[in-house]
Amino acid sequence: MSAVERQNGEHSLPVNIADHIRAESQLHPEVTGSLASILTDLTRVAKEISFTVNTAGIQNLYRSTGRTNAYGENVIQLDEKANQQFKDILANNDNVAGFSSEEEEGFVPYPNSEDGKYILWFDPLDGSSNFDINGSVGSIFSIYKRVSPDKTPVDEKDFIQKGSEQVCAGYFLYGPSTMLVYTARFGVYRFTLNPSVGEFVLPKEYAQIATPDSGGIYSVNEAYSNNWPDSVKSYVNHLKTRPGATSRYVGSLVADVDRDLLKGGVYLYPADSNHPTGKLRLNCEANPLAFVVEQAGGAATDGTNRILDLQPESLLQTTPLIIGSKNEVELFRQFTQRPLWQ
Ligand code: AHG
Ligand code: MN
Ligand code: MN
């Protein structure tokens, strides 16, 4: 029985990730050996980060490095270590010509991999306010084909492509379980790390996941509501009046979006008077999550435009983000575009 038959049939589930990637490569020629090798390397990175997160308290990694990143935020030792773990493993993959990350000032070429066809964006660890309280955190990644010619160093334009150009994106969630959610346009898959054998496996119910068209959860940092435009206040107040409304906010984008993806609802980090262009990073946070959520049947907007249609103008661009079930995302657009609510 082939890996594809095993995956599609009733036998041998959950499928481990190596078999899954082999099966996807057989079904979809776009999932080339190079892309498959990058995805495999990302699972190695995540296993290392998962161990690091689990043991960060005893490795004394909750301290500040004393540095701030390009966004002016305090860099914690755990952020720096996770960034290094991505960097070291991807350095050995000659399909990856370079990367950029939330913890880098610009982009980083891999001089020995100029033949590589792909570049990556990642947020090595997302949800830093959850580090020392043992809350859920995540890693976010995004893979693009480079636009600069092969055999030359990567260029800034490789890193400011529209999100719609992503070939693969996803996230790792380090919670009570370590999970991988990813899409390469052929369904959204949610794997769980089986720590006894160190392998990601795919429970049947998490193959080809679809997000509900509508849901009652809303996830937003409501402490900022005094700084919101009236239109956003009206929208959130409206959500509260609906049957089944409930509020959930972990403060870790990966955990918040993952929950809303499964259960239905909306996550928002709108523009406010302290964050006139939002807080979240377009290239390494909003785009990969928007890609996953859209592939699962949801939607993501900055309030006016589809996130994946935004042309990034800089590596550091931030954006308002409203993401989740299509109906709630569309409702945000209606509230905020209606002059009555401005
Ligand atoms: P990071 O930890 O990578 O810096 O990102 C934090 C982000 C995101 O995970 C979260 O949703 C948001 O910041 C929380 O911001 P507030 O504390 O302003 O709500
Ligand atoms: Mn982040
Ligand atoms: Mn981060």
Image (cartoon, rainbow, N blue to C red):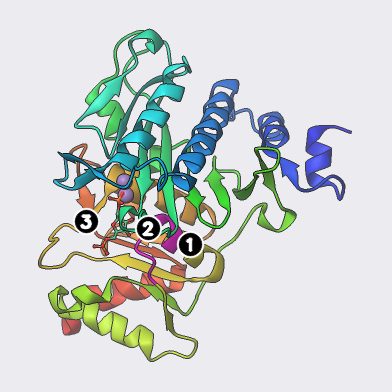
Q: Nearer the viewer, mark 3 or mark 1?
A: 3
The reply to whether the magenta stretch includes residue 252 is yes
User: Residue 266 in the image: x percent, y percent?
Assistant: 41, 70
Query: What secondary structure is found at the residue carrying circle 2?
Result: helix
Q: Is mark 2 within 8 Å of ligand 1?
A: yes
User: Residue 183 in the image: x percent, y percent?
Assistant: 54, 44
Question: Which residue lies under the disc numbered 3?
Answer: 279
Quarter occupied by residue 15: top right
First-in-chain label (1 vs 2): 2
* Residue type, label 2: Leu
Q: Which mark is drawn over residue 298?
A: 1
In which quadrant will I find the C terminus?
Answer: bottom left
Query: What secondary structure is found at the residue carrying circle 1?
Result: loop
Task: Pick the residue in front: 172 or 330.
Answer: 172
First-in-chain label (3 vs 1): 3
Residue at 34% from the left image edge and 48% from the top image edge = 285
Above or below: residue 32 compared with residue 133: above
Q: Which residues are magenta?
A: 249-256
Question: Which residue lies under the disc numbered 2?
Answer: 253
First-in-chain label (3 vs 2): 2
Q: Is mark 3 within 8 Å of ligand 1?
A: yes
Task: Pick the residue in front: 61 or 122.
Answer: 61
